[in-house]
Image (spheres, rainbow, N blue to C red):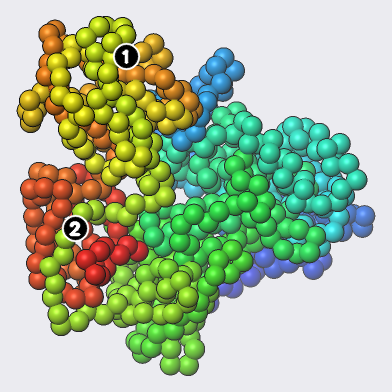
Amino acid sequence: MDIRRLKCDFKIFIVLFLIFIVACKSGIKKMPVGVQKTLVTAAENREELEKVISHYSGESDSLKLKAAYFLIENMRYHFTYKGKSLESFNTIFDRIEQREKQTPFVGNIHFPLIDSWADSIMRINGIPHPGTLKKEFDHRIISAEVLIENIDCAFAAWEFPWARHLTFQEFCEYILPYRFQDEPVESWRSVYMEKFKWLIDSMGNSRDPVKACSIINNDIKKWFRFNEGFKVYPSAIGPLNLLRAKMGRCLDQAGIANFAMRAMGIPVAHEVIPQWGDRSMGHDFSAVLDTNGKFIDFLGGELSPGKNEIRNKASKIFEQHFSVQNQSLLQFDDGLSTVLGRPFGSDATSLFCVTTDLSIPKVKKYPASNVFLAVFDDTRWVPVFGAKENKDKYLFEKMGREIVYLPCSIVDNSLSPLSDPVYIDKSGKIHFITLNQTTQTVRLERKYPLTKIKQWWMTLMGKGRFEGANRSDFSDRETIFIIPDTIALKYHISKVDKSKDYRYVRYLFPDSCFGSLGEISFFCNQSAVPIKGSPIKSAKVNNEDLVIAFDGKWDKFIHTPLKDDYDREWIGLAFDQSKYITHVGYSPRNDGNNIEKGMEYELYYWDGKWVTLGKQRAITDYLMVKKVPGNALLLLRNLTAGKEERIFLYENGKQIWF
């Protein structure tokens, strides 16, 4: 007799028996099995859920009862995080709110003051990492009061003219849910309805949900800011803290859009790119459902419907639902299920990108359920999508283009390659990246591609002007060098137009450049060491920025909140006596990915695993590496500093990045 199977059958019997008891106790006929399972596992909170069911059990509330069933059935898979480190970190929202009332924050991306608060909190109370926090599942903590309020407010929002076309199923997915992702469960609908009730007058007689979405998003643009510092936050920011802080990551941009739109009956979906195909990390955005059943994407508080941009290469895009879409992903840990789309994700890639189906020969010992496509995230291969069986092949449907994929299986929590890497080009043609028998010598200048924003950095110092003078007010100033319109992201030393003695030298920021600058320096008689002097500046330049300009560190830079903050401003040096200036040095904001003299590098090629081609210390601003296998997928790592690294091929003397 199989004792293990007998125990398993007994457990199943117990669960079914408990479900029967709950159904009888509740006195509700035809209660969905999923609802019964939730009640069985709700522990002490079962009574709260039963209150909701009882509240809507009247004949007049039959649709609200179905809505309650929908939420209760699926809530047992949703959770939020709890822990002392998170509770401590959440005090940062009090500080932000207080500061915002006194002196509103300006700009986007970087907020040094908030970063310093966060560092201080985490130094004392620890980093609120998901792995150190406790999960609290919704069905064991949510109150009847919160759930009933959510349902009633959602149904009220369904009555708005721009929401009446929605089917019940669309209403359940895009209006009804009480949560966005894994933020705290809160009573938020009435707060958001009050904040955005002016939309009713603004819409006039229009019934267009896309127009309603645009109107609210334009309002959010005025006060919500992107703050990349919140990347340390372990979950989505809660709806009430979003209103207090008025800032967050792209996940929170989708969150603020979700709460605002759904509160006002505007059907929106949360779209997720778990992992970019050409860089690290992923992305979140939103999509509004129009009256023809088409989703139109947008970015909360930034890009309006129809104006959104998929700025990198998306391997997969998943629409996040409240209901479970993929039961198979419930078996994986949070990390893997997240990059595979989470159990609540449905494949939406082809709605926003051009895609291609990819097939590879089947390996008998690996079932399709354990076969995936992975992309490279700067440090490792990350699975992004599972296979389907198609006769003697594995089929991967609707994959994003211009991306290198690695077919693999998962064995003992490690990836096992099933074939050579595969590249899907812009036209959809499939290329296997297979080593050949030749070797080549390669010249490498970078370890990471120049993205669009970094190409923009290359222009920000263009037309910046160096001047020399012998009077402290620069009334006798002379232009000694003008920076070209575009410069490489590295430290430059240029000969001045005319060498001469000066007591005072300075750099004048060009207009509309965000004060962008990494480093400046001055040289005397071609000395290898920059001249020392007393730093000087114009009135509007911050003292901290003056230090950055002369600190000799390429990883620190000036970048002001507004583009014109340093228009007609300057920084420079005063000498105790005249110096014969022959050269100037300057560096734009730098990503640290150029080859830098003195740093140690290691080049790898892919042959079922990363194989080293040896280490090399740079003696100039490029590396020369011999005997590199032909058609090899390569990876260059800086062993001294930095973390951004991308895979590439070397063709016709150039690095081809993926």
Pick the quarter of the image with the C terminus: bottom left
Q: Quadrant of residue 269?
A: bottom right
* Residue nearer the viewer, 414 or 231: 231
Query: Which percent across, then down, holds residue 354?
Result: 54, 70
On residue 255, the disc is none
**Left of 314 or right of it: where is 153?**
right
Q: With 19 as the anchor, is 409 left or right in this view?
A: left
Nearest to the observer: residue 429 or residue 67: 429
Q: Quadrant of the N terminus?
A: bottom left
- As helix, strand or loop, the secondary structure at mark 1 comes to strand
Could you tell me which residue is drawn at 42 percent across and 68 percent down?
Answer: 402
Taking the spot 72% from the left edge, 40% from the top edge, the residue there is: 216
User: Residue 388 location in percent, x, y?
Assistant: 49, 81
Residue type, mark 1 in image = Lys
- Is 158 located above or below residue 19 in the figure? above
Residue position marked by numbered label 1 in the rendering: 537
Could you say where residue 385 lies in the image, as x and y percent from the top left?
Answer: 46, 70
**Identity of the amino acid at label 2?**
Leu
Residue reaching furthest to the bottom: 391
C-alpha distance separating marks 2 and 1: 38 Å
Of 91 and 622, nearer the camera is 622
Residue 111 visible to an observer of this rendering: no
Sequence-earlier tag: 2 or 1 = 2
Q: Residues within 10 Å of mark 2 (few under 14, many from 20)?
A: some
Q: In the figure, 182 relative to 295: above or below? A: above
Q: Is residue 181 left or right of residue 591?
A: right
For mark 2, what is the residue? 444
Q: What is the secondary structure assignment of the residue under circle 2?
A: strand
Q: Nearer the viewer, residue 439 or 469?
A: 469
Whether the residues at callouts 2 and 1 have beta carbons within 8 Å, the answer is no
Task: Residue 277: tell me if it is visible.
Answer: yes
